[in-house]
Amino acid sequence: MSIDVTIRGAGIFGLSIAWACVRRGALVQVIDSGGVAAGASGGIVGALAPHVPENWNPKKAFQLDSLLMAERFWTEVGGAHGYARTGRLQPIADDAGLALARAREDTAATLWGNAATWQVVTNVPDWAPTSPTGYWVHDTLSAHLHPAKACAALANALKSRGVQVLPDGAESGPVIWATGVAGLNALNTTGKRPMGVPVKGQAALLRLDRAGTPQLFADSLHIIPHCDGTVAIGSTTENSFDHMEPDALLDDVVKRARAAVPALNGAAVIQRWAGLRPRARSRAPMLGAWPDRPGHFIANGGFKIGFGMAPKVAEVMADIVLEDRNTIPQGFDVLASV
């Protein structure tokens, strides 16, 4: 049996692309020596949050499309992925922030249309973070999932279609490299300038059941009420590090989150996570043909938005390898980054 597409990397990009290809009838193999979600995709936060509705650009438009595709995508995948579109609350710090938030109500109505809303509100649940002004932004576009469980759900869906994640194997057909930090480092050796860098992140998981309530964004932290009775808090952004274990920085994250959201006080920390995330120089995903390697393609640079971008990334990568149709936005094209 001939393989149509080989995908190296069993993180969110690799598994999502494999799913999109399989659904179009392709025979696919996924290869990853570490197994499913061995890298940054094995995290615990999973915020699928939009960019602010202003200064519109192709990256924001692509992300909006992908976030709107997510519910159908994860419904078709099935399993315990933890996807829920319950919106997000953000406290408004001062009068200037309030004026800006009100202006964004109008731009959201224009840019998001009827798909979602961005509104200044005063009536919020007791789960909401403390707000100095007594006002919050509530958007209905934000969603969340459990990253490691979502990857496991994708792997199980692929298995039901006869696709196993293999530790090694011979490549056949077009090869898509969705290998995260390792792939980013490999790209850095081939270009005239660095394509991106690994960035360490740390997050914590608390035992607290707020399932079904909006996720929160306060003091630069994502606070995610998972469907399984836990709350994830994250994360740090560390450009300088010498180990991969969670350290004292995570204690500060938990302290800040509890100060911003009193409902977290007394909730026990049950898991601490750290990982390296691939940040492209442009901070947008890098997609498309691998320079100087015919038949090889890149899907990398998800950084903090990989899970939110994955449904549409999967479709545009399936377009290019199965139909020779390039629908990748120019700002995402890896050839433009070399």
Image (tube, helix red, strand yellow):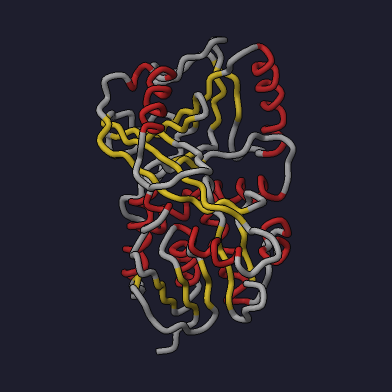
Q: Nearer the viewer, residue 26 or 3?
A: 3
Q: Look at the picture and state if 41 lies above or below 174.
A: above
Question: Image height check: is 304 above or below 16?
Answer: above
* Residue located at (27% from left, 25% from top): 267
Total numbered labels: 0
Q: Position of residue 210 (x, y in %)?
A: 33, 28
**Residue 146 in view (yes/no):** no
Q: Is residue 289 left or right of residue 78?
A: right
Residue 139 versus residue 188: which sits nearer the camera?
A: 188
- Residue 19: image location, x then y, percent: 45, 66
Residue farthest along the front direction in this orientation: 242
Q: Is residue 298 visible?
A: yes
Q: Quadrant of the C terminus?
A: bottom right
Answer left or right for 296 relative to 292: left
Note whether 133 is above or below 249 in the view shown: above
Quadrant for residue 189, please give it: bottom right
In the image, what residue occupies the spot 45% across and 57% down? 12
In this rendered view, identify the residue nearer to me: 83 or 167.
167
- Given residues 205 and 337, the one toward you in this image is 337
For the N terminus, the quadrant is bottom left
- In percent of width and height, residue 260 lies at 44, 19
Residue pushed farthest bottom? Answer: 1
> Residue drawn at (62%, 79%), measured in percent from left and top?
293
* Left or right position of 37 against 299: left
